[in-house]
Image (cartoon, rainbow, N blue to C red):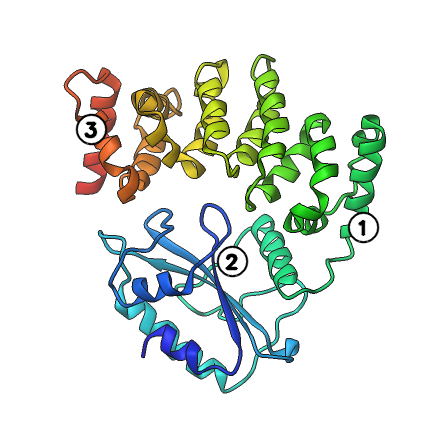
Amino acid sequence: MELNEYLAQLDGQYRLYDVGRRIIKVDKAQFKKFESSDSAYPHPYLQHAWLALYISPPKQPENETLMFLKWPLDEQGKIIPYVRDDLVRRLIELSKTPLKVDSEIEDPLKDNPFAFKPDNVRLANLHAMIQTSQHRKPSEHYNSVVKYLQAGTLNRENLANFEGLGLQGIADVSARLTEHKASLKACLPHMPSEALLAFSQCLEHHTLPIDLTEVMLKRFQHDLNTQDNIINIEAAMRIIGASQSDTLRIEAWQSWFNSDYATHIACVLAFATRNYDDLAFMPERITTFLVNLAQLNQEQDGAFTAFCKIAGDLLFLPGIRNLLLNALRNENRPAILGEALQALMNTRQS
């Protein structure tokens, strides 16, 4: 039995979320093709599908179930059948004894070899998305974040009073982005670094409208010209990376590539793990990106460890694979890319 078949038999609703790079609702039709081995998984990360399966029986919130599954993928990015079969078997056993999900949302399949527990940031954001989708009230931390934004809108000096804000409350506000867009537009350009980073860890999971992108881009370009400003830069990259505007995202990345922050590890990782596909809009930057990636941590280990892990993951993705390979195989490539490519090949042979 396939997972789709099992879920179709349930007297209830279910949702699938990808929680690998960003939290994304997975299209059920697309997932069915993946599960039937007709297509590759659409959002792979580190050669796995990182899934959250939420099952909600109608009018039975006490019997809701949420589980987190880390499914390994084959070389083509497709499902490995026995992994799916193991889950279906466990679900059938699980259905005999309804489980409850408390307000903190825990994975009920703790003994599942393919289960995992996301970090607290992802848990908070997923909880906020589920509560919003079910038209439920936000958490008790929500109002304090709303009041913080209201106070910051009236006077930007109030934005310094961010201590005590709960991450869950920020996630709740972010999940209701449309409702709070005006106050976010007024406050994000002036938030202190720590507050901006916290908001970025939640806003990056939601599509950013153009007007909100514009105010963040203005701050980002200003911060790029300021020294020792890495927290602001990373936070802005997370937020802008979720923008619905290709044009504004590319403008931001071009500014970043031209800045002193282009080689900073936090920025390179933020771009490589979230917005790598935007390289298709900037083919002239691919070699620069790969060189910056190859240089990460070289002074510490000299083994291209970061490059092998990140580039190895990106080369697994059909949409970007050929663009990267063309740059890596180019006869005129920088010497460091030849060394990094050899290191990557060695890791795959070992």
Q: Residue furthest left?
A: 331
- Measure how far apart labels 3 and 1 are at the Cα level: 51 Å
Residue 90: x %, y % from top left? 41, 77
Residue hosting label 3: 326
Of callouts 2 and 3, which one flags the residue occurring earlier in the amino acid sequence?
2
Mark closest to the chain's N terminus, 3 or 1: 1
Query: Which residue is at 28% across, 62% downward?
Result: 79
Q: Position of residue 121 (x, y in %)?
A: 60, 48
Q: Which mark is residue 143?
A: 1
Q: CA distance from mark 2 to mark 3?
A: 37 Å
Find residue 224 and report its horizontal and vertical position in percent. Answer: 56, 17
Task: Tell me whether the residue at label 1 lies in contact with that at label 2, contact meaning CB atoms closer than 8 angstroms.
Answer: no
The type of residue carrying mark 3 is: Asn
Which quarter of the rendering shows the N terminus?
bottom left
The residue tagged with tag 2: helix, strand or loop? loop
Q: Which residue is painted at 34% across and 73% down in the image?
A: 86
* Left or right side of 134 for 283: left
Judging by the rendered image, the residue that carries numbered circle 2 is 117
Q: Nearer the viewer, residue 130 or 247?
A: 247
Position of 58 with respect to 169 (left or right) is left
Observer-side mark, 1 or 2, equals: 1
Whichever of callouts 1 and 2 sits on the residue coming sooner in the sequence is 2
Task: Give the amino acid at mark 1.
Answer: Asn
Find numbered disc 3 in the image and state the secondary structure of the residue it sits on: helix
For residue 144, say whether it is visible.
Answer: yes
Total marks drawn? 3
Residue 276 is tagged as none
What whole-number distance in Å separates the C-alpha atoms at marks 1 and 2? 28 Å
- Which callout, 2 or 3, points to the residue nearer the camera? 3
- In this rendering, is residue 59 above or below 114? below
In this picture, residue 194 sits left or right of residue 298: right
Q: Is residue 350 visible?
A: no
